[in-house]
Structure formats: C-alpha cells, structure tokens
Amino acid sequence: MRTTELLSLPDEAATSALARRLAASLQDGLVIYLHGDLGAGKTSFARAFLQALGVGERVKSPTYSLMESYRLPARIAWHLDLYRIADPGELEWLGLDALADPSALVLVEWPERGEGALPAPDLRVDLAYEGLGRKAAFSALSSRGEAVLARLSDSLAGLIL
C-alpha cells in the first residue's frame, strides 16, 4: 500500500486544487473512500473533483438522498454520503450493483457505514482539521489506486498547496 505524506490545505481553495489534481490523474474508473470528521471537507473535495471531470450541473451533497449520479463524457460518476446510515443493510434498496462497473467513478463519504455493501476501494482519502485549514493524505488500496497515486504524486512534486 502506497501512502502520500500529509498535505497541508490552508483553505477551501487548496482543497479544491488538490481535488482537481486528483481528477487530472484519472485514466479509468476508480472507487474512492473519503474519510474524515464532520466538516473536514469531504463534500467540498468531492464537488471540486466532479466539477474538474466535467460535471456541469450543481454537485449537491447526497446527505439526504444518499446517492447522486452524474453522467460524464466517458463514464458515470456516483457520489454517496452514508452519514445517516445505521446499518449496511439499509443500502439494499439503492441498487448498488451499478457501482461495480469497472469504468464507474465512485466517491463514498462515510464508507465505514456501508461496510460489506460497497465495492472495495482503490484509493482512500483522509481529510482532517489542521488549525484553521485541513490536511489530506492518500492511500492506494489496489493497483488502479497505485497508478493514480503515482500520477498524482508526480503532479504534486515540488508543489506547495
């Protein structure tokens, strides 16, 4: 498993810039688990990431709908927020079979609440508070995640966010 060093994100603009760089590092579908405390920037990160991939419509938080889908030029993207889920069995009616498509892009906030019902992650993004800003770290959990993380690391070389 490859992990990046902690990246300092002094403001929301830096979080968005990092999400855009991750989006530029994609070549295929990917399953991304977003971890962090409430308010750590998971939805902001997901929004910037999806917009960088070409989502032209408003990217809203799926906190109440649980799942939103977006048609991209080459694939479909799914954004899930499982904060309100108490048991993974509650996800049964969502039709999560579509998430298994290897070309799909899947972003999951609070993935630990859907354990066993979700596809395995390729990449883990950890966001945390750091003073008035945030910090981020990435962990590759598959060969697809390794490839994306290698491209991301190359694009971040020498960059101070």
Image (tube, rainbow, N blue to C red):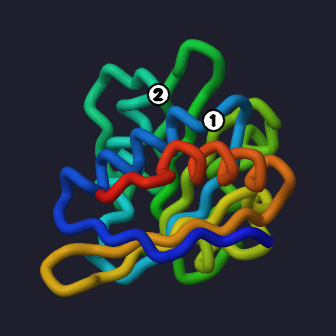
Residue 27, percent from left and from top: 69, 29
* 96 lies above or below 119: above
| SS for callout 2 | loop
Work out whether residue 66 or residue 106 is closer to the camera in this orientation and state it.
Answer: 106
Residue 144, percent from left and from top: 80, 47
As drawn, the label of residue 53 is 2
**Which residue is at 83% across, 59% downward?**
142
Confirm or deny contact between disc 2 and disc 1 (CB under 8 A): yes
Number of other residues with Cα within 10 Å of mark 1, as a class: few under 14, some 14 to 19, many 20 or more: some
In this image, 20 relative to 153: left or right?
left
- Alpha carbon distance from label 2 to label 1: 9 Å
Identify residue for label 1. 26
Quadrant of the rendering where the N terminus is positioned: bottom right
| SS for callout 1 | loop
Number of other residues with Cα within 10 Å of mark 2, as a class: few under 14, some 14 to 19, many 20 or more: some
**Which residue is at 46% across, 61% downward?**
81
Q: Amino acid at mark 1?
A: Leu
